[in-house]
Image (cartoon, grey):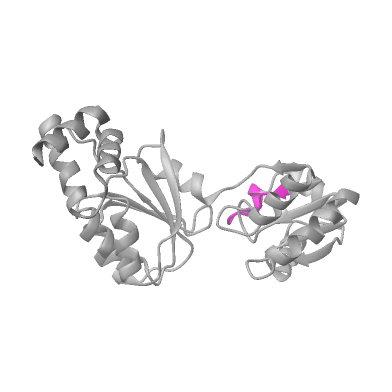
């Protein structure tokens, strides 16, 4: 079968006993970077020397079928450089191919930068959405944030330290200066740091220079207290931007809890 194995995101002591036991017995490990994995095996004191196969964004699709067939004969351990495979890391297409081929997939749970940052952020954890990396280009980034204006769940992003300040500026611009943000840096490592505050207030700190692995946690939009009249106004605003009336009514109904039918009929009446 295929074994998805979570690895430490910083502190080597977070490696589970099950991970170490599995690596000591593994014949083959498919990994994001063979050099990083070889270094991890040495750091964990693994005496076994499994065969290391590169599995990354550029070759996963073409290698998936071959690896799935290999997993029919012997267990295949899959690892990313840090954290959980398949979560903004290679592994998804391999798992998809394995499921389609009827090959078993199991998991060795462990560290996850997404869940770790969410837990330490101080922001609501009952509902959240993981959005991966924000786009590199500002125009695309503003568009992506615009799509999340009405998102009520806590949002988790990965970000490059070099783009952090620009992303915070754009978050403040689109979601509001006071939108609560937690910037989680170097989680589980010696210089772990979490900066919390309004998006705009964190910009000067980020502009001064930030290093390390970054996870951004952003509070969701506050629920709107709306009545039918304000709901209809929001529907008509979406329609003016090119959304079909039916779709606009459905979107506002979901965001506000108002009746989709009432919104549609009231909006239709107001246009006559």
Examine the image and state in which quarter residue 35 appears: bottom right
Quick one: 4 or 161, which is closer to the camera? 4
Spot occupied by residue 145 in the image (x, y as percentages of width and height): 31, 57
Q: Is residue 270 magenta?
A: no
Spot occupied by residue 49 in the image (x, y as percentages of width and height): 86, 62
Asked if 73 appears above or below 56 in the picture, the reply is above
Please tell me which residue is depicted at 53% across the width and 57% down the height of the picture. Answer: 189
Quick one: 7 or 64, which is closer to the camera? 64
What is the total number of numbered labels drawn onto the structure image?
Answer: 0
Please tell me which residue is depicted at 43% across the width and 45% down the height of the picture. Answer: 129
Residue 98 seen: yes
Q: Residue furthest front?
A: 272
Please tell me which residue is depicted at 64% across the width and 61% down the height of the picture. Answer: 81
Quick one: 62 or 80, which is closer to the camera? 62
Asked if 33 appears above or below 244 in the picture, the reply is below
Spot occupied by residue 168 in the image (x, y as percentages of width and height): 29, 62
Spot occupied by residue 255 in the image (x, y as percentages of width and height): 28, 36
The magenta region covers 4-14
């Amino acid at each position: 079968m295929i074994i998805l194995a979570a690895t430490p995101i910083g502190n080597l002591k977070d490696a589970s006993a099950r991970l170490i036991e599995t690596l000591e017995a593994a014949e083959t490990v498919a990994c994001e970077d063979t050099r990083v994995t070889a270094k991890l095996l040495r750091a964990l004191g693994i005496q076994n020397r499994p065969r290391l196969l590169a599995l990354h964004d550029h070759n996963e699709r073409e290698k998936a079928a071959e690896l799935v067939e290999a997993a029919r004969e012997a267990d295949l351990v899959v690892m990313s450089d840090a954290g959980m495979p398949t979560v903004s890391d290679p592994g998804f297409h391999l798992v998809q191919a394995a499921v389609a081929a009827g090959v078993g997939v199991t998991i060795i749970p462990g560290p996850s930068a997404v869940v770790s940052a969410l837990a330490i952020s101080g922001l609501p954890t009952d509902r959240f959405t993981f959005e991966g990396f924000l786009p590199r280009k500002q125009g695309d980034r503003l568009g992506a944030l615009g799509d999340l204006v009405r998102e009520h769940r806590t949002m988790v992003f990965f970000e490059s330290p070099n783009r952090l300040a620009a992303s915070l500026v754009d978050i403040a611009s689109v979601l509001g200066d006071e939108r609560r943000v937690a910037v989680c840096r170097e989680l589980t490592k010696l210089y772990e740091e979490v900066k919390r505050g309004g998006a705009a207030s964190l910009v000067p700190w980020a502009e001064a220079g930030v290093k390390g692995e970054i996870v951004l946690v952003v509070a969701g939009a506050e629920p709107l207290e709306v009545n039918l009249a304000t709901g209809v106004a929001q529907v008509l605003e979406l329609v003016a931007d090119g959304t079909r009336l039916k779709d606009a009514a459905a979107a506002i109904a979901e965001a506000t809890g108002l009746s989709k039918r009432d919104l549609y009929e009231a909006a239709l009446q107001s246009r006559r």
